[in-house]
Amino acid sequence: MSEQKKIHGNSKESKRLTFLYRLYDYLRTFLKWGITSSENPEKRYTNKYMKDKQMDIVASGSRKEMLDLERKKIEDDPGCLNKEKWASKNKKDNFKN
């Protein structure tokens, strides 16, 4: 009998369907990119937190695919709540000195 290694739900190797989302406030100000493997993505946050926010699902796929896509999106166009050290890494300024 072979023993299968258990994979944590937040591991890149997780096979759970994962969603990439954009979070906005009630004025449609972009707040952040994020991922969740919750069957109901809006359950990622409490009802109280989501009271004045909206979540738009952008893509879905494997945990690894969504982690990679989330990182690229945060590097290129982070929201004000994306505090990752790679936020804005690839953002291009439109102004030149």
Image: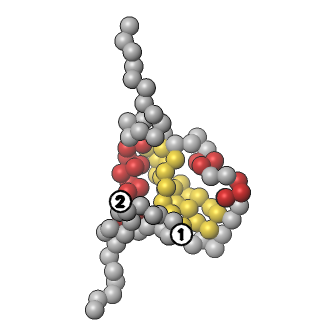
Residue highlighted by disc 1: 30
Q: Residue at x 32, y 76 (%)?
A: 92
Against 72, residue 62 (above or below) is above
| Position in image of residue 67 (x %, y %) | 40, 49
| Position in image of residue 85 (x %, y %) | 37, 62
Q: Secondary structure at mark 2?
A: helix
Say what amino acid the circle numbered 1 marks: Phe
Q: Residue at x 67, y 58 (%)?
A: 49
| Position in image of residue 83 (x %, y %) | 45, 64
| Position in image of residue 53 (x %, y %) | 64, 63
Q: Secondary structure at mark 1?
A: strand
Say what amino acid the circle numbered 2 marks: Lys
Q: Which mark is residue 72?
A: 2
Residue 24 lies in quadrant:
bottom right
Tell me if mark 1 has few (under 14), some (14-19) or many (20+) residues whose alpha carbon lies within 10 angstroms of its own: some
Q: Residue at x 38, y 40 (%)?
A: 12
**Colour basis:** secondary structure
Against 87, residue 67 (above or below) is above
Label 1, label 2: how many angstroms apart (C-alpha)?
A: 16 Å
Residue 61 lies in quadrant:
top left
